[in-house]
């Protein structure tokens, strides 16, 4: 009986110690603002995903109509949203064997009173992808998946950075 109690206590000790070390599951961010203005372009898939994440996870209303900019607590200026594809490897006959995909997103956040809350910040994601001319369609699909994965990473980084803004700065 005593042995069973000791084994049970030993098995539960990591679970009992975890809350004391500061461990907590990641929760939805709490933002210091309720409305955000950003003129995302209609074709920006990153802008669409960011807007969706802010409105669902962060309970923030995203305003894209410039006529309603005065209703916004903060303004997210998108300075750059670029996808790049460069050759990083070729074989002896000069045929491409490897590409590097990059997703660059540069933004800044300012209050409605024009005070800078987050200075111009660039988030860069990059992935390497091999290339084979006999599997072009498969490689195009893989490229699309890699860009979507990088885009999701960028959106999560933006969300974490927006969550660092405190109410006394706005």
Image (cartoon, rainbow, N blue to C red):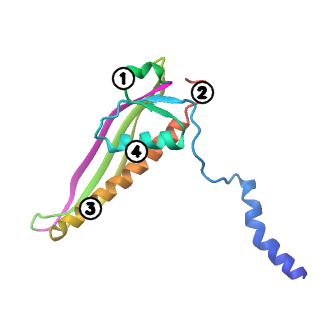
Residue 1 spot, x, y in % from top left:
90, 82
Q: CA distance from mark 2 to mark 1?
A: 24 Å
Between the residue at mark 3 and the residue at mark 1, the CA separation in whole angstroms equals 36 Å
Circle 1 sits in a helix, a strand or a loop, which is it? helix
Q: How far is disc 4 from disc 3 in space, using C-alphas?
A: 20 Å
Instruction: Specify the quadrant of the image occupied by residue 88.
Output: bottom left
**Residue lying furthest left:** 93
Using the image, determine if residue 37 lies above or below residue 2. Answer: above
Magenta span includes 119: no
Residue at the spot of label 1: 66
Contact check, label 4 and label 1, Cβ < 8 Å: no
Residue 49's tag is 4
Asked whether the beta carbons under mark 3 and mark 1 sit within 8 Å of each other, the answer is: no
Q: Is residue 89 magenta?
A: yes
SS under mark 3 = helix
* Residue that mark 3 sits on: 141
Q: Residue at x 81, y 77 (%)?
A: 7
Q: Position of residue 119 (x, y in %)?
A: 44, 29
How far apart are the alpha carbons under marks 3 and 2?
43 Å
Name which of mark 2 and mark 1 comes first in the sequence: 1
Q: Are marks 3 and 2 in contact (CB under 8 Å)?
A: no
């Amino acid at each position: 009986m005593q042995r069973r109690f000791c084994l049970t206590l030993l098995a539960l000790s990591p679970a009992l110690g975890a809350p004391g070390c500061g461990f907590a599951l990641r929760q939805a961010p709490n933002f210091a603002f309720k409305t955000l203005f950003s003129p995302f372009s209609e074709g920006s898939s990153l802008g669409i995903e960011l807007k969706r994440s802010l409105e669902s996870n962060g309970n923030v209303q995203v305003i894209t109509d410039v006529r309603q900019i005065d209703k916004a607590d903060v303004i997210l200026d998108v300075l750059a949203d670029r996808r790049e594809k460069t050759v990083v490897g070729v074989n002896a006959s000069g045929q491409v064997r490897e590409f590097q995909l990059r997703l660059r997103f540069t933004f800044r956040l300012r209050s409605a009173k024009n005070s800078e809350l987050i200075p111009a910040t660039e988030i860069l994601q990059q992935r390497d992808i091999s290339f084979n001319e006999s599997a072009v369609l498969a490689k195009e699909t893989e490229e699309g998946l890699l860009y979507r994965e990088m885009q999701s990473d960028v959106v999560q980084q933006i969300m974490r950075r927006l969550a660092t803004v405190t109410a006394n700065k706005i």
